[in-house]
Amino acid sequence: MNQAVRITSDSTTDLSEELLERYHVSLLPLGVTLGGKEYADGVNINPDAIYEHYRKTGELPKTSAANLSDCEAFFKENTKDGNALVHFSISAEMSSSYNNARLAAQNFDNVYVVDTRNLSTGGGLLVVAACEMANSGMSAEEIAKACTALTNRVEASFVVDDLEFLYKGGRCSALAAFGANLLKLKPCIGVINGKMNVVKKYRGKFEHVLEDYIKDRIGDTSDIEPDRVFVTHAGCSPEVCERCVELVKELGDFKEVFLTRAGCTVSSHCGPNTLGVLFIRKHPINQ
């Protein structure tokens, strides 16, 4: 009989409370520094607090990975009942979270760390897949290997309404931000080989752009796993979110379509009025 397996992730996977409770997933929060104070992502600070602080001061937060001792304490707590553990981290290309967790796991015989090669619910898709594998009786080692192999089938992208946060955070130049805003361009940012890249530029009102974007990404649905699709946003209006969820449902016969809110890490980089559709393809994505 296989050892019981528990699934955890860092706080960047942006899973809803509903899914965290359904699959009994525990989160290791990243650090958030704002206004000279230290916070834990999703524990004592949320994205709306970041946006409000920015409106008042013009200051964006700095995010930081859980350090080695934090990872070790988290793994110890989540293996104290004798179960094995599979832990998921934001792409190693974006943060030291994976490396810190990997080093901490070396002090345990039953902890496996997976680099999602992604962010937000791109990683969340792998977490849910891992939970279902655990429920089916797979071992921790088998789950870690299967999910690592699955990373190149995850399609994650977002459309950003305004480049202000990306510019202020040093992720695009002043010239690029000025040109995009002048031309009313809305960049689609995709995760490719573990990094964020602009994959397409749309023009027009954000609500109309989102419809074109979703139709482009979903396509004819023939190469998309039908189990679940995430619609993840960083502070869009309820009306915009509802319309995007309904459009995804209209375009494909998916078993579940989840609406989730991006946490502090993603929100602090992209800003409000950012929305993406994320799913797993049936075949590896050519990157």
Image (spheres, rainbow, N blue to C red):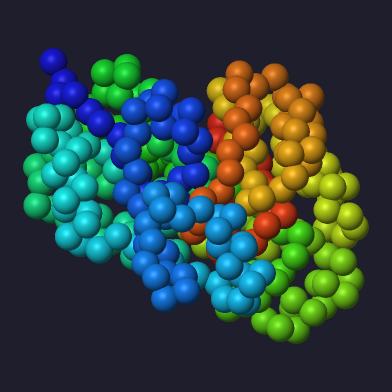
Q: Can you give x and y, in whole percent of width and height, for residue 141 in the image? A: 22, 35
The residue drawn where x is 64% and y is 46% is 233
Residue 235 visible in the displayed image = yes
Q: Can you give x and y, in whole percent of width and height, for residue 139 in the image? A: 22, 27
> Hey, which quadrant is residue 272 in on the image?
bottom right
Relative placement, left or right, of 282 versus 212 is: left
Which residue occupies the foreground of this view, 149 or 159? 159
Relative placement, left or right, of 19 versus 68 is: right
Which residue occupies the foreground of this view, 272 or 83? 272
Numbered marks: total: 0
Relative placement, left or right, of 244 versus 167 is: right
The residue drawn where x is 9% and y is 52% is 107
> Hey, which quadrant is residue 186 in on the image?
bottom right
The residue drawn where x is 37% and y is 67% is 38
Q: Quadrant of the N terminus?
A: top left
Q: Can you give x and y, in whole percent of width and height, for residue 125 in the image? A: 49, 36
Q: Can you give x and y, in whole percent of width and height, for residue 59 in the image? A: 57, 76
Relative placement, left or right, of 272 versus 43 is: right
Residue placed furthest toward the bottom: 175
Please tell me whether residue 106 is drawn above or below residue 17 in the rendered image. below
The residue drawn where x is 56% and y is 48% is 262
Which residue occupies the foreground of this view, 119 or 69? 69
Please tell me whether residue 233 is drawn above or below residue 63 in the rendered image. above
